Image (cartoon, grey):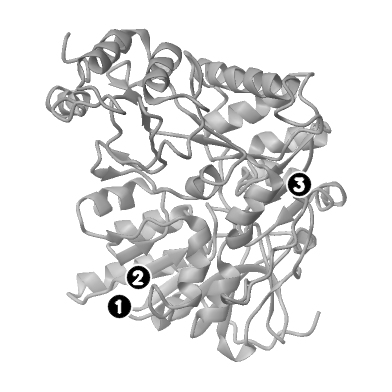
């Protein structure tokens, strides 16, 4: 590598350069590859300025959620606007109180929106790297996200050079930026492990204002072991996929899988490895989680295309200690490729995502409680759901000790409409909605997926609703949600 001549400064010095009202774009897709030292320094700086009566708030971009970054900046009241996704409890509360403006976006849309200025100018890109060169090659760490686009668009760049991460991550990286329309050719990814780009991102070295040195892990902790509900959901999904394969609707070599973040998706992936009838498979997904490491080492998972290594610190070390094995089987891509609708459809990806609730028509809500309060955001679930060969949504049938049914007459925020959702699953059962008319679809969802405590009410709702193509009673469609708000439970009949 060429010698590095960029100024070395402290995180505090870097933070002092980023001014109130500016837009800062941070690396990271989940906590993987997130900037670490500079966000901490920015939070301290915001608190100091606020204590002196001075304003200090930033517009914040990232690839997806960011680990501690959102917590730190939200707690310091240092964020005016945020996009495209977050998973911070503190930031969520401030968004829902309108103290932070939030733009919820499909993750595949973000790079183009930044590249063409839909979201305004990017003043700073703060990017974690495992290595850099004097000519502006940036070897990213455990995620790619939107960092290549941020580097291209930002007026100023600060690099967090994190020596904790293996420089061999570049062997997994496959980095490109789509040309502007109408000059785009088909993306030549015909297998999850195809590579079409370079092992590094590029930036004009004149834009690199400084480098700060760091040596710390991503800080991801292991997911909880699957509980009984998650295991039951997982078994429903595995049995369904096996029946689809036996019927010839999934080819003998299987199809690539996508799995969202969280314990249910992790449980499904673990269960796939436990069933001897599931053939070895590949993944075309946005996050590579802990359960996939065992599957890959055991030969069940042949290869995975992803945007980030969203694994616990211990499991990341497992990867680093066996890079000869993993670099041949994992491809790290920018999110405009990992979540690209055209590639998802071409490969026939089977999408496995979780929902907050789904309704009797098959619409799914992934983002808002009672239609008002944001949880995290839509993330990449829409990218995959709309374009998947099979789109599957999973949820427990009830939560909060049975006070909330996840099967409702009408979702309060339709992130994924009935035309995209093909299968819904709870621990009670699985409803295959393909080819069903509205009446049969509703009956199937109630009988297969709803908790027994809510089935009678849901059946009565359909029976008592005005007749039309879809049975829906606009006076009562949110009666469960109103009861939850007023009484703390959807069971208004108790």
Mark 1 lies on a secondary structure that is: loop
Instruction: Give residue 390's quadrant in the image.
Output: top right
Q: Which of the numbered marks, if any, corresponds to residue 319? A: 3
Residue at left offset 47%, top offset 24%: 436
Whether residue 484 is visible: yes
Find residue 201 and report its horizontal and vertical position in percent: 67, 73
Residue at left offset 56%, top offset 88%: 207
First-in-chain label (2 vs 3): 2
Q: How far apart are marks 1 and 2 (CA)?
A: 7 Å
First-in-chain label (1 vs 3): 1
First-in-chain label (1 vs 2): 1
The quarter of the image holding the C terminus is top left
Q: Distance between the residues labelled 1 and 3?
A: 40 Å
Q: How many neighbours does mark 1 have within 10 angstroms: few (below 14), some (14-19), or many (20 or more)? A: some
Instruction: Give residue 315's quadrant in the image.
Output: top right
Q: Which of the numbered marks, if any, corresponds to residue 273? A: none
2 vs 3, front mark: 2
Find residue 42 and report its horizontal and vertical position in percent: 39, 70
Q: Which of the numbered marks, if any, corresponds to residue 59? A: 2
Outermost residue, right direction?
Answer: 324
The one of 389 and 401 positioned closer to us in this rendering = 389
Identify whether 384 is placed above or below 180. above
The quarter of the image holding the N terminus is bottom right
Identify whether 259 is placed above or below 275. below
> Which residue is label 1 attached to?
21
Find residue 389 and report its horizontal and vertical position in percent: 62, 39
Q: How many neighbours does mark 3 have within 10 angstroms: few (below 14), some (14-19), or many (20 or more)? A: some
Residue at left offset 22%, top offset 20%: 490
Mark 3 lies on a secondary structure that is: helix
Contact (CB < 8 A) between labels 2 and 3?
no
């Amino acid at each position: 590598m060429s010698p590095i001549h960029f100024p070395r400064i402290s995180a505090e010095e870097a933070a002092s350069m980023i001014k109130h009202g500016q837009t800062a774009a941070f690396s990271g897709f989940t906590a993987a590859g997130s900037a670490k030292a500079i966000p901490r320094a920015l939070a301290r700086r915001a608190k100091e300025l606020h204590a002196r009566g001075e304003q200090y708030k930033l517009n914040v971009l990232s690839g997806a959620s960011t680990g501690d970054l959102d917590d730190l900046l939200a707690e310091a009241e240092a964020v005016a606007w945020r996009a495209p996704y977050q998973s911070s409890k503190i930031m969520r509360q401030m968004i829902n109180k309108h103290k932070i403006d939030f733009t919820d976006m499909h993750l595949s849309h973000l790079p183009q929106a930044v590249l063409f200025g839909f979201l305004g100018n990017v003043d700073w890109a703060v990017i974690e790297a495992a290595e850099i060169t004097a000519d502006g090659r940036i070897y990213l760490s455990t995620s790619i996200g939107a960092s290549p686009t941020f580097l291209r668009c930002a007026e100023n760049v600060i690099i967090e050079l994190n020596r904790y991460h293996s420089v061999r991550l570049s062997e997994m990286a496959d980095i490109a930026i789509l040309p502007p329309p109408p000059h785009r050719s088909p993306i030549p990814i015909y297998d999850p492990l195809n590579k079409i780009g370079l092992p590094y991102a590029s930036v004009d070295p004149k834009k690199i204002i400084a480098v700060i040195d760091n040596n710390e892990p991503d800080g991801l902790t292991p997911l909880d072991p699957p509980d009984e509900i998650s295991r039951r959901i997982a078994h429903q999904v595995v049995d369904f996929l096996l029946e689809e394969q036996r019927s010839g609707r999934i080819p003998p070599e299987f199809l690539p899988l996508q799995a969202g973040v969280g314990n249910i998706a992790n449980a499904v992936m673990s269960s796939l490895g436990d069933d001897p009838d599931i053939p070895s498979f590949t993944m075309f997904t946005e996050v590579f989680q802990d359960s996939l490491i065992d599957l890959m080492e055991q030969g069940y998972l042949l290869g995975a295309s992803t945007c980030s290594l969203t694994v616990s610190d211990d499991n990341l070390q497992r990867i680093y200690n066996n890079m000869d094995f993993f670099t041949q089987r994992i491809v790290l891509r920018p999110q405009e490729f990992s979540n690209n609708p055209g590639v998802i459809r071409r490969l026939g990806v089977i999408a496995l995502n979780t929902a907050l609730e789904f309704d009797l028509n098959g619409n799914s809500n992934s983002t808002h409680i009672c239609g008002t309060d944001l949880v995290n955001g839509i993330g990449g679930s829409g990218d995959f759901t709309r374009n998947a060969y099979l789109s599957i949504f999973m949820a427990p049938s009830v939560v909060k000790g049975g006070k909330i049914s996840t099967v409702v007459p009408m979702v309060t925020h339709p992130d994924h409409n009935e035309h995209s959702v093909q299968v819904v699953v709870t621990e009670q059962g699985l409803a295959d909605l393909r080819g069903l008319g509205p009446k049969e679809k509703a009956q199937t969802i109630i009988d297969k997926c709803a908790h027994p405590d809510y089935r009678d009410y849901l059946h009565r709702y359909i029976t008592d609703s005005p007749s039309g193509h879809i049975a829906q009673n606009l006076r009562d469609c949110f009666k469960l949600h109103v009861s939850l708000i007023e009484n703390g439970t959807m069971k208004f009949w108790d």
